[in-house]
């Protein structure tokens, strides 16, 4: 059974940093691309970033480019999102998702339950 | 970036009725790389359809996807009470892999 467990969310001041983690199990982690998607309170889904199975290819939404960094540790079956220079508009539930193939151009097959990030002073 | 526009914003129907949801792209979605997701309150989204028309594992056959190019649809043939939720389309043919704004399906 595929399981994705996000952690690392919380309250942070504007301009601050936070690192999210997503622990994966139930599949061969390195064989699949992974992604982060966020949802602001009461709003729709926003794609944030994706990374290929080997970690060599990464993609970002314009709204986070230059501030967020996606990475993965295939030896630990863990996905990360380093978030710097946080803004109030980054407040959202952040979901980790497993794609259906190793390449990033794929559907989001499984989702975690999300972790809440609140950016406020 | 490809902008996806979903219509209608809200769809009010009754159990047993047929629902047709639309997703229109600002330019052609390559290789029909379009997916549909269902989200219920307080839950993570769930994949329903990928590749525009292929049902995901475990999805009932009352859900069907169609379309190509810039116009896509999700059809629910006979609504069950558990189908009332918010539905999102997403294109993954061109980064950034954008979502539509969602259609709320309500009783």
Image: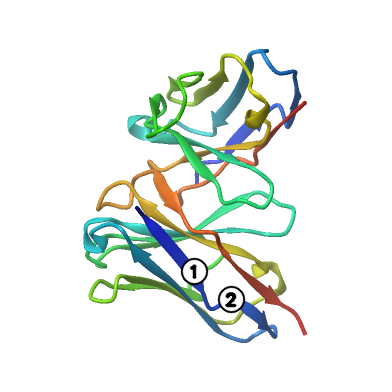
Q: Are marks 1 and 2 in contact (CB under 8 Å)?
A: yes
Chain where mark 2 sits? A
Residue at the front extreme, as displayed: A1
- B13 w.r.t. A104: above or below: above
Marks 1/2: CA–CA distance: 8 Å
Chain where mark 1 sits? A
Which of A32/B80 is in front? B80
Which of B81/A37 is in front? B81
Report x, y in % for residue A17. Answer: 57, 85
Q: Dot 1, how many residues are within 10 Å of its Cα: few (below 14), some (14-19), or many (20+)? A: many
Residue A6 is tagged as 1
Going 27% across and 48% down the picture, which residue do you hit? Answer: A101
Report x, y in % for residue A71. Answer: 35, 73
The local secondary structure at tag 1 comes to: strand
In the picture, measured across the screen, residue A52 lies left or right of residue B47, that is left
The quadrant of the rendering that contains the C terminus of chain A is bottom right
Q: Dot 2, how many residues are within 10 Å of its Cα: few (below 14), some (14-19), or many (20+)? A: some
Going 35% across and 50% down the picture, which residue do you hit? Answer: A99
Report x, y in % for residue A14. Answer: 69, 83
Report x, y in % for residue B99. Answer: 55, 44
Going 65% across and 49% down the picture, which residue do you hit? Answer: A44
The local secondary structure at tag 2 comes to: loop
Which of A59/A20 is in front? A20
- A47 w.r.t. B32: above or below: below
Number of numbered discs:
2
Residue B78 is tagged as none
Which of B13/B10 is in front? B13
- A2 w.r.t. A91: above or below: above
Residue A9 is tagged as 2
């Amino acid at each position: 059974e595929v399981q994705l467990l996000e952690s690392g969310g919380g309250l942070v001041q504007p301009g601050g940093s936070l690192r999210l983690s997503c622990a994966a199990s139930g599949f061969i982690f390195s064989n699949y691309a992974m992604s982060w998607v966020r949802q602001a309170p009461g709003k729709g889904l926003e794609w944030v970033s994706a990374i290929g199975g080997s970690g060599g290819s990464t993609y970002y939404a314009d709204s986070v480019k230059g501030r967020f960094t996606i990475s993965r540790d295939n030896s630990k079956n863990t996905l990360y999102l380093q978030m710097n220079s946080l803004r109030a508009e980054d407040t959202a539930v952040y979901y980790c998702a497993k794609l259906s193939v190793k390449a990033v151009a794929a559907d989001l097959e499984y989702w975690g339950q999300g972790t809440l990030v609140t950016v406020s002073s | 970036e490809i902008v996806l526009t979903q219509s209608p914003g809200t769809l009010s129907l009754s159990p047993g009725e047929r629902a047709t949801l639309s997703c229109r792209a600002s330019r052609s979605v390559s290789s029909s790389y379009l997916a549909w997701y269902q989200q219920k309150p307080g839950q993570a989204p769930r994949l329903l359809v990928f590749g525009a028309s292929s049902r995901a594992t475990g999805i009932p056959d009352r859900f069907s996807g169609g379309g190509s190019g810039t116009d896509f649809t999700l059809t629910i043939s006979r609504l069950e009470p558990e189908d009332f939720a918010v539905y999102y389309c997403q294109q993954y043919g061109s980064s950034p892999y954008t979502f539509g704004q969602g259609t709320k399906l309500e009783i």
